[in-house]
Image: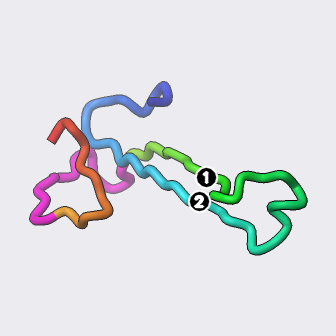
Amino acid sequence: MPAGIYQAGSVIVADTSYTYVPAFGSTFMSWDTSGITFSHTTYMRPRNTTLIPYAPTSVPSTSTVCAAY
């Protein structure tokens, strides 16, 4: 976690991942035909409050819940 983001209160963590498969040209460029995976994680602090209550009612099958919960 970046310095300065870990303080009392909530932290918003967003993980994204996308697999790009080119429509053409991958065989000419000797790329892996399964695609190129791009991923990024960002950390943010809430702007209008210091604490965000967390009470999930359900979790979609494509999502994961932080191990701390």
Which corner quadrant holds the C terminus?
Answer: top left
- Say which element carries label 1: strand
The residue segment tinted magenta is: 46-58
Q: Are marks 2 and 1 in contact (CB under 8 Å)?
A: yes
Q: Residue furthest right?
A: 28
Relative placement, left or right, of 12 versus 33 is: left
Separation of residues labelled 2 and 1 (CA atoms): 4 Å
- Say which element carries label 2: strand
Amino acid type at mark 1? Thr
Q: Residue at x 80, y 62 (%)?
A: 26
* Residue indicated by mark 1: 37
Amino acid type at mark 2? Thr
Query: Which badge, 2 or 1, comes first in the chain's sequence?
Result: 2
Quarter residue 48 falls in: bottom left
Q: Residue at x 27, y 45 (%)?
A: 50
Which corner quadrant holds the N terminus?
Answer: top left
As drawn, 11 above or below 24? above
Q: Residue furthest top?
A: 3
Quarter residue 45 falls in: top left
Front position in the image: 13 or 46 = 13
Relative placement, left or right, of 24 versus 55 is: right
* Residue indicated by mark 2: 19
Q: Position of residue 60 (x, y in %)?
A: 24, 66
Magenta segment main secondary structure: loop
